[in-house]
């Protein structure tokens, strides 16, 4: 690939003037229709020397967290965004300078969208922590949360005006210097008070103390309380989850059914299997095996809705999604081709997927293509839930915690290991018969695992 260069003058260590060629690394097209990403962390600093294809930045898209390689070599001249910023495809991330550089064609990096671009004003969305080393982030607050400040009351002084303040860091800085940030004039987008505004007020000796503001504003107590609130922009994965779950609730005529199940024999089977093989098997992988057999028996459950074509799509493959709580938020990584796996292969795949949940760093392929979702919320210590269907799928099975409970066995009351199964389904795909049959099949397998043998 080719890269445009611009020549600037610099002075080397012995004072001699030399020419440098600066090139800009822009955020590439991340695919899947994604147009923006959140910058998580820089892997380099200003002044560092980098080589072609060296990983320089970690970004989070709505699909996954990825490290991006620099398409050319040189010295980092500037970082154009800070950790926590939202950057758009085509926006400059960093500038690389190299003395006497020649244009480099065909660098090893093959992500779409590399090239040069004039620096663009980056988004003001920032976490309250995380400023890239060597960067100079703007102090403007996110435009999405900015509001126009109310006009001053007639005859009131400047402290009567209440300006919007979105950053807790700005509020704390003002408070530490005896100022009330919300009573300062804001120069940010929509009149938002920025860090620069507070610093200017400190330097000018402006008096907007909380006590003085109380005299000018009868709602001071309420406003001061609001100043202590923390605002977190809904961006990245959280934004995608919010939109998808909202759409699911609005679009799907869902119904929920549930069963309480005696899991005593399942636990006994797990121990016997581990003793015989010397391998570890999770309850999740065993239940997943029962679920796969149930989906083969009742294929309408392994479907999705094509709303544009107004069709029910029954899938030939079973790609099992596993709802997982990660540091990034709720994600549903997918075990592809689960119906073709042996129990040992399924256990390995489930274990690997669950292991990755601790970081939330799943590839795009690992988060797409699911046909049915299994949700184990029993790990959070709850008995049941009415889960929200993962679009465009038509059903989800939830597993509650296993707990000692009274149970009747052969007419006698005893204590057994009991769990709750919650099953939610899309009434557009099926009525109550198939979901009930599917749920009772899985329950029977849990209560009597040997009953699955004819299905294998």
Image (spheres, rainbow, N blue to C red):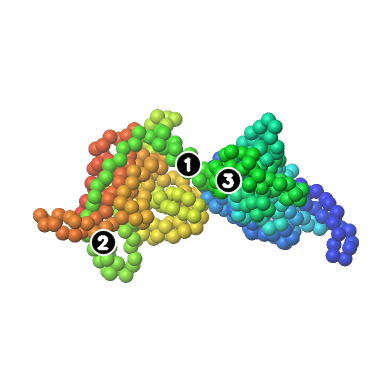
Residue 324: image x %, image y %?
42, 52
Q: Nearer the viewer, residue 186 or 440?
A: 186
Q: CA distance from mark 3 to mark 1?
A: 30 Å
> What residue is pinned by disc 2?
267
Q: Could you say which disc has been placed on residue 224 in the image?
A: 3
Q: Residue at x 62, y 55 (%)?
A: 130
**Based on the displayed image, in which of its 4 quarters is residue 306 positioned?**
top left
Residue 370: image x %, image y %?
41, 46
Residue 388: image x %, image y %?
38, 42
On the rendered structure, is 432 left or right of 83?
A: left
Q: Nearer the viewer, residue 349 or 127?
A: 127
Residue 71 appears anywhere in the view: no
**SS label for mark 2:** helix
Considering every residue shown, the one lying at the far right of the view is 16
Circle 2: is it few (<14), some (14-19), or many (20+) Cα within 10 Å? Answer: some
Q: Could you say which disc has been placed on residue 351 in the image?
A: none
Residue 326 appears anywhere in the view: yes
> What residue is pinned by disc 1?
242
């Amino acid at each position: 690939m080719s890269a445009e260069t611009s020549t600037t003058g610099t002075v080397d260590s012995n004072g001699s003037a030399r020419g440098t060629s600066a090139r800009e690394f822009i955020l590439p097209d991340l695919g899947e229709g994604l147009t923006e990403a959140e910058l998580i962390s820089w892997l380099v600093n200003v002044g560092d020397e980098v080589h072609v294809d060296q990983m320089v930045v970690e970004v989070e898209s709505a699909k996954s967290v990825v490290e991006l390689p620099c398409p050319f070599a040189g010295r980092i001249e500037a970082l154009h965004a800070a950790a926590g910023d939202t950057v758009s495809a085509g926006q400059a991330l960093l500038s690389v300078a190299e003395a006497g550089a020649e244009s480099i064609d065909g660098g090893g990096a093959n992500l779409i969208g590399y090239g040069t671009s004039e620096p663009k004003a980056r988004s003001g969305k920032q976490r309250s922590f995380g400023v890239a080393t060597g960067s100079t982030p703007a102090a403007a607050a996110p435009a999405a949360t900015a509001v126009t400040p109310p006009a001053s009351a007639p005859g009131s002084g400047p402290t009567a005006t209440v300006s919007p303040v979105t950053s807790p860091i700005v509020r704390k800085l003002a408070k530490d210097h005896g100022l009330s940030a919300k009573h300062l004039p804001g120069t940010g987008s929509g009149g938002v008070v920025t860090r620069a505004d507070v610093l200017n007020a400190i330097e000018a000796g402006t008096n907007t103390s909380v006590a003085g503001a109380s005299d000018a504003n009868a709602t001071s107590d309420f406003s001061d309380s609001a100043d202590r609130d923390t605002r977190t922009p809904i961006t990245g994965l959280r934004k995608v989850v919010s939109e998808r779950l909202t759409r699911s609730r609005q679009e799907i005529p869902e119904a929920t059914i549930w069963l309480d199940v005696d899991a005593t024999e399942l636990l006994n089977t797990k121990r016997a299997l581990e003793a015989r093989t010397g391998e570890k098997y999770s309850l999740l992988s065993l239940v997943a095996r029962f679920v796969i057999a149930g989906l083969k028996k009742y294929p309408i459950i392994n479907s999705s809705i094509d709303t544009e074509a107004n069709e029910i799509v029954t899938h030939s493959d079973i790609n099992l999604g596993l709802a997982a709580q990660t540091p990034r938020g709720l994600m549903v990584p997918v075990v592809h081709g689960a119906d073709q796996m042996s129990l040992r292969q399924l256990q390995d795949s489930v274990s690997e997927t669950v292991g990755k949940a601790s970081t939330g760093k799943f590839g795009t392929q690992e988060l797409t293509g699911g046909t049915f979702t299994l949700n184990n919320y029993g790990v959070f210590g709850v008995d049941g839930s009415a889960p929200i269907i993962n679009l465009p799928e038509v059903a989800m099975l939830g597993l509650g915690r296993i707990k000692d409970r009274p149970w009747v066995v052969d007419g006698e009351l005893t204590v057994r290991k009991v769990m709750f199964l919650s099953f939610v389904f899309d009434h557009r795909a099926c009525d109550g018969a198939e979901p009930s049959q599917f749920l009772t099949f899985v329950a029977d397998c849990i209560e009597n695992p040997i009953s699955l043998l004819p299905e294998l």
